[in-house]
Image (cartoon, rainbow, N blue to C red):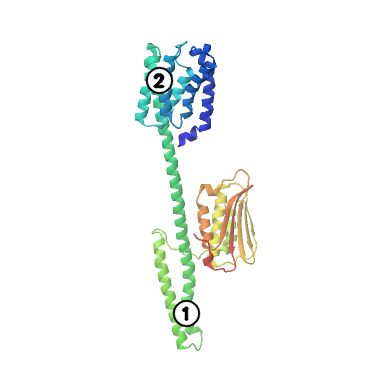
Amino acid sequence: MQWRRLWPEPVVLVATFVMFWIAFGTAETTYDIHATGRGPMFFVALIVAAPLAFAVTRPLPALMFSVATAFVLAFTLPVLSNAPWPWLIVQGLVIFALLFSTAAQRSVRDTLGAWVLTSSLFYWGVQPNARSGWVVGLGAIALFGVLTGRLLRARQDLQAQTQVSEEERARRRVLEERAQLARDLHDIVAHHMSLVVVQAETAQYRVPDLGDAARDELLSVAETARKALVETRSLLNVLRREDASAPQAPQPGLHLLPELVESTRRAGVELHADLAGDLETLREGQSLAAFRIAQEALANATRHAGGASVHLETRSGENDFTLTVTSGEPGPVADPAETGHGIVGMRERAAAAGGRIEVGPTPHGFVVRLHLPSDGGDEEEAPDQ
């Protein structure tokens, strides 16, 4: 519970230890026990301060014990001073703390019972002209405890609801990103399948001396490809939102990275780009994924590391492609993984393209590094979603 975070057990134990030594040093000023030695003083200090140790875990039983010992000590030990009450000042402070803690953690009925019990002790022990004042004061302590407890519980519920909302937004972002991946995949597949249809249907006009069997086979291929396109569009209609129209422009890819660099610089970002290697080595789907990840990484760097320099680097190896976006200082750079869900989408795209992505803070900023196979590897080897 948030109450325990507010008053952790080590703090309560230290406060109990302090109260014990104060009670041990002042017991002889309230009770006539000096002549009997320090043994009774130690015992009195112990039973006076010990209930405070349970202020967080069991406040109501501790309060009942403390009130009972105040009655018992006042009856069994000779009282030297009745000001302001016939028990130790420390014990009164402990009772106040336990009443507040009970009101903050327990129900209204338990709080009412605790207030009646404590008021009975003070009504009996204090001077007649001060009784009503102490009863009202104890009621104020109980009321303040009730309000504090409700505030803490409301804050705890708000934090829990906020966490649920964050998780829900993350799940929604994953679903939206996967829907976008499906639409991107549709555009890529539709493009190539359309080429298959056109090539198969026009082969009889482009290829001389094409036999009847080959012509029929090619027409069958064209018909199968056309059916596949229809099925793909039907599935896409399930994923596409009603307000989302199909894109009219060709799908972007790494060949548009120079344009992305220039547009980012025009937005006022100090961007250093090192586009080394062949940007045409990836499959169309991988190239699209890499471009989208570069877009998101640059957007994150712009939002969360305003004023800092950003470095974009690409490297093409024999069997792999690497894209790195690093945001530098000045000033502390916020972790975009903690403030948004763009990282989720980048991970989804990297996995769908058969690669992996590394994101995290560095001593001088934040880095996003994408690794993709560039050997046309089998897409079935992509990591599980």
Q: Which residue is mark 2?
A: 137
Q: Amino acid at mark 1?
A: Ala
Q: Residue 61's image quarter?
A: top left
**Count of marks placed on residues:** 2
Residue at image location 39% in from the left, 26% down from the top = 143
Residue closest to the eye, 193 or 355? 355
Residue closest to the eye, 189 or 15? 15
Q: Is residue 341 visible?
A: yes
Secondary structure under tag 2 reads helix
Q: Position of residue 236 (x, y in %)?
A: 42, 64
Residue at image location 43% in from the left, 15% down from the top = 76
Q: Is residue 85 visible?
A: no
Check whether the beta carbons of the residues at disc 1 and disc 2 lie within 8 A of each other.
Answer: no
Q: Position of residue 16 (x, y in %)?
A: 51, 26
* 240 in relation to 200, above or below: above
Residue at image location 55% in from the left, 67% down from the top = 283
Q: Quadrant of the N terminus?
A: top left
* 133 in relation to 314, above or below: above
- Dot 2: few (<14), some (14–19), or many (≥20) neighbours within 10 Å? few
Q: Position of residue 179 (x, y in %)?
A: 45, 60
Q: Position of residue 339 (x, y in %)?
A: 52, 47
Q: Name the mark on residue 62.
A: none
Secondary structure under tag 1 reads helix
Residue closest to the eye, 59 or 231? 59
Distance from label 1 to label 2 (Cα)?
93 Å
Q: Name the mark on residue 200.
A: 1
- Dot 1: few (<14), some (14–19), or many (≥20) neighbours within 10 Å? many
Q: Kindly report which numbered mark, 1 or 2, lies closer to the viewer in this rendering.
A: 2
Residue lying furthest left: 109
Q: Amino acid at mark 2?
A: Gly
* 194 in relation to 207, above or below: above
Residue closest to the eye, 271 or 366? 366
